[in-house]
Image (cartoon, rainbow, N blue to C red):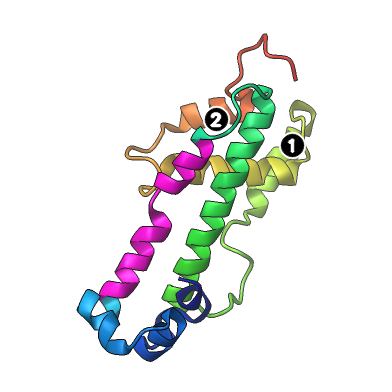
Amino acid sequence: MPLICERGSAVTSRDLAEAAGVSEGTIFNVFDDKAELVEAVVAAVTDPGPVNDAIARIDPSTPFTEQLVAATTLLQQRTSEIWRLVSKLVERHPPKRAPMGEHPALVDLMDRHAHELSIPPKEAARTLQAFVLALTHPMIAAEPAPADAIVDRFLHGCASPQEPR
């Protein structure tokens, strides 16, 4: 997998065989072609099982916040790994514009309501966009969450009002 993450679709079967310490023939005894091998790598990277198992091993005796930080760290690592692989396979060119996620108008909207926020407007805009992505993307959520539910989670969170900070 590291070689595919490094070189993307430009990796050769010879490169993969050398990295695995086997002959090219051995690779093609297991996989029909390079595309099938890449599919297997993508399936392995996107398999939620290992991360789910790691989350299940988080010590339940630690405070809730610490458990959530540990789970979030695991999810962030998995997300980074998936995007590293996907970006190499897609072979994108460096963007000639601002990153896809920046929306100055959303920051302006947040700025107009800065007195209602507990974080800076730019961070609030980024957080809302992350919520929208996470609760809408078809690879993450089977059904997109309604916009009002996303806004409710963004503004009020998931903790009960009695939960101390």
Q: Nearer the viewer, residue 55 or 93?
A: 55
Residue beneath label 2, please? 151
In the depicted structure, whether residue 80 falls above or below residue 123 = below
Task: Please say whether residue 130 is one of the residues in the magenta stretch.
Answer: no
Q: Please state which of residues 161 and 78 is positioned toward the viewer in this rendering.
A: 78
Find residue 31 and report its horizontal and vertical position in percent. 23, 76
Q: Which residue type carries mark 2?
A: Val
Point out the image quarter for the C terminus.
top right
Name the residue located 67 percent from the left edge and 24 percent from the top edge: 62
- Residue identifier under label 1: 112
Going 40% across and 55% down the picture, which residue do you hit?
46
Residue 144, image x and y in percent? 38, 38
Secondary structure beneath label 1: helix
Residue span colored magenta: 36-55
Q: Answer yes or no: do the residues labelled 1 and 2 have beta carbons within 8 Å?
A: no
Q: Amino acid at mark 1?
A: Arg
Who is closer to the viewer here, 40 or 157?
Answer: 40
Answer with mark 1 or mark 2, whichever residue precedes in sequence.
1
The location of residue 128, given as percent across then percent down, is 60, 40
Task: Characterize the local packing of mark 1: few (<14), some (14-19) or many (20 or more) Cα atoms within 10 angstroms.
Answer: few
| Mark 1 to mark 2 CA distance (whole Å) | 17 Å
Q: Is residue 46 magenta?
A: yes
The foreground one among 44 and 82 is 44
Would you place residue 42 above or below residue 57 in this image?
below
Residue 122 falls left or right of residue 75: right
